[in-house]
Image (tube, helix red, strand yellow):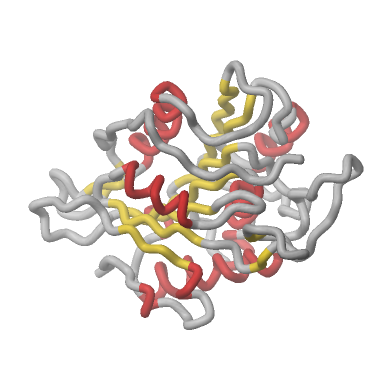
Amino acid sequence: MSRIPTNADFPPAISPLLTIIPPPPTPSSHPPANVLLLLHGLGDKSEPFANLATALRLPETVCISVRAPSPLPLGLPGFHWGDDIFLSPSGALDHDAGFTKSILLLQQIVEDTLVTALGYPRRGIFFLGFGQGGMLALEFATRLRINTGQDDECGGVISIGGPLPYSAPSQVVKTPVLLIGSEKGSLVSIESEKRIKNVFNSVRVVRWRGRNKDSMMQNREEMSDLMEFLARRLRSWAGTGGPSAQEVELGASSSIQVGNDMRQ
C-alpha cells in the first residue's frame, strides 16, 4: 500500500534535492493516488516549483519538487540537469546537454523508491517540467520500457518550453504528453513537434499567444491548459474500491509565480 513518501525513504545523496509537498487534507484515510514530480529549468532551483505545487492543491496527489544535481559553473546561481555545460552557436547555454546522470537520478526516485519501495503504480506518476526540466521528463518517459523491461506508461508529462532531446530513443511511448510553447521564439519548434508526435502516442501541443519566449503560465487561461490535462489523467479513490482514472475537479490559480530558466 502506497503512502506519503518522506525524505528518509530516498537515498542519502538524493534526499537533500527533494522538497515533498503532501496532498491537501481530506476526510479520507486513503493514501495519495498520484505523485507529481516538478523539474525546474536551466539555471533555476527547486523552491519556486515547490511553491507552485503548494498553490496547485492537486487532490490525492503528493508533489515532489526536485532540484537539479549540478550547480552552474563560474559561480553562476542556479542548477542544471545536463551531463555537461555546452554553448549553442548563439553563445547561450545549450539545453540539450545530455541527461544520463539525471535519468539515473529520476530512476532512483521513481523506480527504486516510489514504485518498488512504496508501491506507487507508474500510471499514477506525473511530471511537470520547464525548459531543460521538461526535456528530462520527456526523455525519462521514452526510456521507461528500456529501463524497466515492461510496456508500461506514466500518468503523463507536461513540458513547458522543453522539446524532446535528440538523445531520446525513438520507440513508441504510451505516456501522454502536453507540450506547451510560446507563440514565437520557443524551443518547441515545428520540427520538434513532429519529432515528439512520432514517438509519443498521445500529444497535445498548445501555443500560448502573445508570448515571444517560453515562460511559465501567467494567467488563469494558461493554467487551465495544465489543469484540463491533469483532470483527465489523475487517479482518484472517490467512489471506487481503489484508485482509478477518472476526471478530478481541480481549481486554477491565476497568481502563481515561478522561476524561468536561463534564456540569453
Q: Residue furthest front?
A: 75
Place residue 189 in its image quadrant.
top right
Q: Nearer the viewer, residue 20 or 2?
A: 20
- Up/down of 216 relative to 124, above or below: above
Q: Nearer the viewer, residue 189 or 82?
A: 82
Residue 8 visible, this angle: yes
Residue 138 visible, this angle: no
Residue at 69 percent across and 37 percent down: it is 198
Return the x and y of residue 101 as percentages of the image width and height.
68, 69
Is the C terminus in the top left, top right, bottom left or bottom right quadrant?
Answer: top right
Residue at 77 percent across and 64 percent down: it is 74
Residue at 57 percent across and 41 percent down: it is 159
- Up/down of 179 relative to 80, above or below: above
Is the N terminus in the top left, top right, bottom left or bottom right quadrant?
Answer: bottom left
Place residue 81 in its image quadrant.
bottom right
Residue at 72 percent across and 40 percent down: it is 263
Return the x and y of residue 150 as percentages of the image width and height.
53, 63
